Image: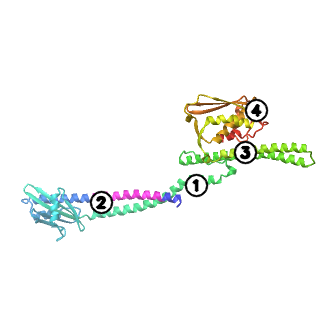
Amino acid sequence: MPVRLRITILFTLMVFIVLGIVCSSIYYFSYKTRRDAIRVRLSNRAITTARLLSKSEIFDRQLIQRIDSLTTLALKNKSVQAYNDLDKRIYNYSDIPGDTVTITKDILDKAQSKSSGHYFEQGNKEVVAYYYTDPGFRVIVVCAATDEDGKKILLQLRAILISSFLFGIFIAAIGGYFFSRRLLMPIKNITQEVTEITAQNLARRIPTGTVKDEWFKMADTLNELLNRLQESFELQRRFISNASHELSTPLTAISSQLEIALQRKRTPEEFEKIIADVRQDVQRMSKLTQTLLEFAKAAGNKGGLTINLVRIDEILMETPAILQKQNSQYDVFLEFGALPENEDDLLVFGNADLLSVAITNIVANACKYSADHRAVVSFLIEDKCFVVAVADKGEGIPPEELEKIFQPFYRVDSVRSSAGFGLGLSLDQTS
């Protein structure tokens, strides 16, 4: 089901519930008010009749009947009955001759037990049985009538509420449809913008607008994602371009030397020299390929690496021997600060191979670009953090070049003539 339709249905359902509660409440309280009003009016009429009956020396039965007939109660089909303590009817009046309410002993007993009178309905009439007591006089007066006007007004109110309810639901459905359309319009615009963004126009961004609401946050988050993707694509493009260039150089040299060698007959000494040159280029290409593989491994899924507890001091102590194998001229001097008594405090979670590669590359760079090919590696613990510092006597890196040193294949101009690929620091950062 489309989101727009779901929002419309949900909005309409909410309005349905609210309108249902409001309309039901209005009708209920109107019905209760009408019933309470007629109950009070019938009770007052019963009290008046009881008081007249209690003054028998002044009002006889015929006079009371005349009074009842002349009294305007705004109710139709009135009837009044009175019963003494022996449940015998002592008075009766009705607008329509012979129209009376059937009274049982149970009704009379309930009237005596309720001080405000017993209210009930019989047929289309509403009845109040009221127990009146006065010194030396007790009587139960039953007053009944039909509230046609009140019920007619209640029926009109019910029709109005039902019409209002249905009209409100209709308006809510239409309003919900346009409301959902307006609500989802930013998502539609964002979707269209994202659809048009491809690898060829990654610089394009989603308009965020000026109102900092949820849509602004979503668009801003997507723009940040696009920034990271653009940076990754740009980095990958430069990496592929530089890698292709670095690989093509030894391949071109090998191809050229072999072509020159085949142009004429050569002496064994000349072939040995050509083979030595080709071997040097192959070794360079092999080293570059191995470095690229290490870079790809370090830049891959971190979740796929084996992470264990590693002794960082042991990795440092292996570094001089590794570098001696790479170049006998490299000299590495280790300086250890105050080490903790507990050996477990030297453990760190990581991948031993990648940590070794990262440290070795940094120290190798220090040895390579130092005048005496010597590097000093210091290890100390500060605030429960391991600090590995590498010092050399090299030229250093110009401040304006520092932000570029972690880019793959990037090399400072002053060292471009030296052997290397410019992948060391990139590999170290990834590791």
Q: Nearer the viewer, mark 4 or mark 1?
A: 4
2 and 1 marks in contact (CB < 8 Å): no
Q: Secondary structure under badge 2?
A: helix
Q: Position of 13 compared to 392: left or right?
A: left
Q: Nearer the viewer, residue 57 or 129?
A: 129
Q: Earlier in the sequence, mark 4 or mark 1?
A: 1
Mark 1, residue position: 188
Quarter of the image holding residue 245? top right
Per the model, the C-alpha gap separating discs 2 and 4 is: 105 Å
Above or below, 145 against 295 in this view is below
Q: Nearer the viewer, mark 2 or mark 3?
A: 3
Mark 3, residue position: 290
2 and 4 marks in contact (CB < 8 Å): no
Instruction: Specify the segment rendered in magenta.
Output: 9-33
Q: Amino acid at mark 4?
A: Gln
Q: Earlier in the sequence, mark 3 or mark 4?
A: 3
3 and 1 marks in contact (CB < 8 Å): no
x, y percent for residue 251:
81, 47
Q: Earlier in the sequence, mark 2 or mark 4?
A: 2
Q: Secondary structure under badge 4?
A: loop
Q: Residue at x 19, y 56 (%)?
A: 116
Mark 4, residue position: 329
Per the model, the C-alpha gap separating discs 2 and 3 is: 90 Å
